[in-house]
Amino acid sequence: MLKKINCVLTAEFNKKIKNREGNEQLIKIKQFILHLNSVLNENILWEKIIFVEESESNKIFYDFTLNNYNTYIANGIMVSNCMGTIHANSAQETVVRLTSPPMNVPEIMMAGLDLVVLEHKIHDKKKGLIRRITSISEVKGALEGKATTDLVYERDPVKDTMERSALPSKYLHELMDYTGKSESMIENELQKRIKFLESMQKKGITA
């Protein structure tokens, strides 16, 4: 059924492209086609959920879901979120540790790792011991057999802010390709999320 829907949408998309019709509608169709293509991959195995069990909890939970499409591929499994932690002093050291004993992750598998977010404990004269994200790096070159990292964001210790580097973002262009959104549309989405996180910080809501 999904394959039939995908074929119909692709045909409609090609037709409208040919006739140069409805730019906004084309973007939505392209987004959905790309999403369908990602879940129709022959390497994906679908499993039926047998049951869902609810349990009571007094904890506060926050839903950080993405609009429309909120699935990710992690270790070959489709999940709703994907993040792992490892002890390392730099983004490049993270790659080295993953590909060295005892983990021995094949270097080609590093192509599935998009970002390395580095967090440090820092002693601040006014605030004491604080945790701060000090850098965000992108992983590249894994498919060529030489996985390296590019620094895209770095902490400014004076301003206590994350500053964008001059290097181009590979992940940003991948987002543009897979979502059909322009760079300005993605930037607008990022600004919305920044405002949301800042509002949580002002209210004293922490992890």
Image (cartoon, rainbow, N blue to C red):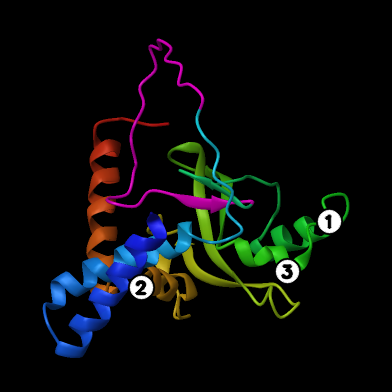
Task: Name which residue type carries label 2.
Answer: Met
- Tell me the SS state at disc 1: loop
Residue for badge 1: 104
Placement of 54 over or under 65, stated as above or below = above
Q: Which dot marks residue 39?
A: none
Q: Give the extent of the magenta segment.
A: 50-75
Quadrant in the picture for the N terminus: bottom left
Percent position of residue 19, x then y: 15, 88
Q: Nearer the viewer, residue 76 or 143?
A: 76
Residue for badge 2: 176
Q: Nearer the viewer, residue 104 or 78?
A: 78
Main SS of residues in magenta: loop
Quadrant of the image occupied by residue 147: bottom right
Sequence-earlier tag: 2 or 3: 3
Report the mark closest to the observer, 1 or 3. Answer: 3
* Residue found at the far right of this picture: 101
Q: Residues within 10 Å of mark 2 (few under 14, many from 20)?
A: some
Q: Is residue 64 magenta?
A: yes
Q: In this image, 168 relative to 120: left or right?
A: left
